[in-house]
Every structure is written in C-alpha cells, then in structure tokens.
Image: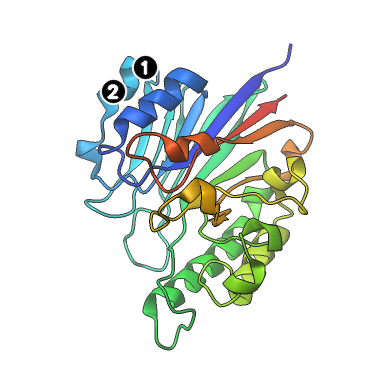
Amino acid sequence: MTDRLTIATWNINSVRLRMPIVERLLRDHGPDVLCLQETKCPDANFPEGAFRKLGYEHVAINGQKGYHGVAVVSRRPLAEVERRGFCDKGDARHIAVSVPFGGTSLRLHNFYVPAGGDEPDREINEKFGHKLDFMGEMRSWLAGEEARRPAVVVGDLNVAPFEHDVWSHKALLKVVSHTPVETELFEEIRRAGNWIDAMREVVPPTDKLYTWWSYRAKDWDAADKGRRLDHVWLSQPLAGTLRSVAVLREARGWEKPSDHVPVMTVLEG
C-alpha cells in the first residue's frame, strides 16, 4: 500500500494578519503538512489554536517578534524538531522536523533565506553580504548527511535561479535575487547535495514559473512581473516519489494576500 503526502510551503508575511487566507488554503486544499515562512511573531503568540481546530494538531515553531520566523503545522506527528542558526545572527530562519512517510520518515527542512537588501554589493550593503554568507553555510551543511537521507527542503529561498524564473532575465541581472553571484551560489548548493529541483522536474525550464509578485504593481496579474523565489528540493532517496507540484497563483488575488503564493508538492511512496 502506498503512502501519499502533500506538503505546502508559503511565505505568509505575518501569520496572524493573514490567518483567514491560511485557513482558506487548509480548508480548500488540505495539505498534510504546511510550512510557513515570515510568520513575524514570537512562539508564544503563534495561533496554534486556529490550526488545531482545522485538524493540524502537530505544530513546530521557530518564531521571532516582528521579523522572520518559520513554522510547520501538520496532520501527521512531527519528531526530532531542530532549529538551526546561521551566521551567528540569532534569526529565526530555519526549522527541521521528521514526518512519517512510506512506512518510515522523511526529514523536512523549512528555510527563510535573507532577502539581501537592494544593492547587490556586499561592500556597501551588509544585508547582501549576510545573504551570501547564509547561503554559504547552507551549502556546507546540505552537501552532507542531510542529502543522503530521505529529505525535502522547502521555503522562501529568495533566489530566482534560472532565466525563466523571472519576468525578464535581462532586466533583472543586476537586481537582488537574480544576480549571477546569487544564482551561481544557489545552484552550487543544490548540486553539492545532488538535490532535485522538484518544481522544474514538473514544469520545463523553458516555461515561465513564478511564486512571487510585488505589492508595488497596480495590477499584479496583468503586469505579471513575477519571480520564482519559493522552492522545493528533494534528496536523491526520494527521487521516485514525486507525483506533482502546483503553484496556487490564484492565492495572490485573495483578500489581504501575501506577495508570495503557496506551492503544493505531492509525494507518493
């Protein structure tokens, strides 16, 4: 008998502010596990009760007042919760849990990579330097044991690595999230652990694919100036389990939306 697992990832840009659309996602789509980024609240203020009412009784949080924050809510039990720090900053940007799957379990990593500010030069922009350092630490860690076991990396990784992950490759080459130094480092991280880019396994690299649209656009849908900043990676032991990936673009048009939309991945094993 096979086991089917649906994992959703979503930068929610304040979980308390946007709880109504989180509830909509859970009611309408019912993922087994939801990974949130940029929750923007300390652990004590996380709305656990609302999730439990919807059947998501297992909650793991790494929160921070006003900034950052990641969380995992699940219908399935969560074990071996780990919160890893990066760059000695004390930021809440990672949480890992073990989730039952296929008669055993998989390791699920939920990341919120620093955005990197506006200027792609670490000499004049400390935030950009922090982003590159954070990614450097990710590369060292995700190249080892984490990549050799059944594992999934999800989250707002804040890099659009390929030409068709942005609305205009040429226009964004000097814009943070699509600069060559970022995209090359991003792919170094993925290749170092031989991680599978699940979204591009399903959607050809020649097709446009976005998960984020700026709040600055008057009509985000018509302008369609998006970027793929949210990602799903699978370790090689899970290579044969991928069944589908869906970007819920319509969520960008929900009431009081995040600028990111959920990405839903189905595994079967």
Report which quarter residue 57 is drawn in. top left
Q: Are marks 2 and 1 in contact (CB under 8 Å)?
A: yes
Answer with left or right where residue 1 lies relative to residue 98: right
Residue drawn at 67 percent across, 38 percent down: 150
Q: Amino acid at mark 2?
A: Ala
Residue located beneath label 2 in the image: 50
Secondary structure, mark 2, is helix
Q: Secondary structure at mark 1?
A: loop
86 relative to 157 in the view: left or right: left
Marker count (numbered): 2
Q: Quote the CA–CA distance across marks 2 and 1.
A: 7 Å
Residue 43 in the image: above or below residue 213: above
Residue 66 pos. (x, y %) = 23, 52
Q: What residue is disc 1 on?
A: 54
State left or right for residue 246 relative to residue 203.
Answer: left
Question: Is the residue 209 above or below the residue 264 in the image?
Answer: below
